[in-house]
Image (cartoon, rainbow, N blue to C red):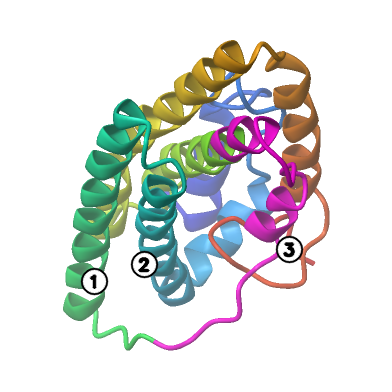
């Protein structure tokens, strides 16, 4: 199977919908093709994403230190993200990929603009934001694994299930925080879903793990 055919098959396997009910749009086939062609940048940015995910979990532990259920879940999540980082670095070394600084993409920053500034809405929004980032990672691992194949595909396939757990952890915490505060969670999930789909399907000049459609 040619690289182009592999990309098409991987995209077709996800059907016309996203791999997760949380997401409104699947990863565009053009992005999958770009990722297969730029595996070095993909791995470098993925390593950065794993570090950022661990850092986010730790920051939430400090922000909501009085919530022992939240801190316990974030502690486990941070440890797992760091193990993922180590797996990516090991593969990068095996492929002689030299880490370099990459300017951040627009995805996470644009999602976080939607997060409320004041509590209790802020906590709910932070958890929803985390859920979408993890869900998109999960969806992209599923799409990339068969398209890239080889050791990278094996790594991504192995990470898929962990990301699926992570997005559910964040979504459960969002619902819990919303219930405790007596506010609705569904309208905010919808707002984030619309923005997230726009970021994934619109033209994006910078290629990153969570970037949109390439030019």
Name the image quarter holding the C terminus.
Answer: bottom right
Mark pair 3, 2: CA separation: 21 Å
Of residues 18 and 192, which is closer to you in this image?
192
Q: Mark 3 and 1 residues: CB-CB less than 8 Å, in contact?
A: no
Q: In the shown orientation, is residue 82 left or right of residue 103?
A: left
Q: Which residue is mark 2?
A: 47
Q: Around disc 3, counting alpha carbons within 10 Å, would you say few (fewer than 14), some (14 to 19), or many (20 or more)?
A: many
Q: Around disc 2, counting alpha carbons within 10 Å, would you say few (fewer than 14), some (14 to 19), or many (20 or more)?
A: many
3 or 2: tag closer to the N-terminus: 2
Q: Which residue is mark 3?
A: 214
Q: Mark 2 and 1 residues: CB-CB less than 8 Å, in contact?
A: yes
Stretch in magenta: 100-127
Q: In the shown orientation, is residue 135 left or right of residue 51?
A: right
Q: In the shown orientation, is residue 150 left or right of residue 105?
A: left
Residue 116 belongs to the span the image colors magenta: yes
Q: Which residue is mark 1?
A: 89
* Residue 188: % across, % down: 75, 25
Q: Residue at x 35, y 53 (%)?
A: 58
Whether residue 9 is visible: no
């Amino acid at each position: 199977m040619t690289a182009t055919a592999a990309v098409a098959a991987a995209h077709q396997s996800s059907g016309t919908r996203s791999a997760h009910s949380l997401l409104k749009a699947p990863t565009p086939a053009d992005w999958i093709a770009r990722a297969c062609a730029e595996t070095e940048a993909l791995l470098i940015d993925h390593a950065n994403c794993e570090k950022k995910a661990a850092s986010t979990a730790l920051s939430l532990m400090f922000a909501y230190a009085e919530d022992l259920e939240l801190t316990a879940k974030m502690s486990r999540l941070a440890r797992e993200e760091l193990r993922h980082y180590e797996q990516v670095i090991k593969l990068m070394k095996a492929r002689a990929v030299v880490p370099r600084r990459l300017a951040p993409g627009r995805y996470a920053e644009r999602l976080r603009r939607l997060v409320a500034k004041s509590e209790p809405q802020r906590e709910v929004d932070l958890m929803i934001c985390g859920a979408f980032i993890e869900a998109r990672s999960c969806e992209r691992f599923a799409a990339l694994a068969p398209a890239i194949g080889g050791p990278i595909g094996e790594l991504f396939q192995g990470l898929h299930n962990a990301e699926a757990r992570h997005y559910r952890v964040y979504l459960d915490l969002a619902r819990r925080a919303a219930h405790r505060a007596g506010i609705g969670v569904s309208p905010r999930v919808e707002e984030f879903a619309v923005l997230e789909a726009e970021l994934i399907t619109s033209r994006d000049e910078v290629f990153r793990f969570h970037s949109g459609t390439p030019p």
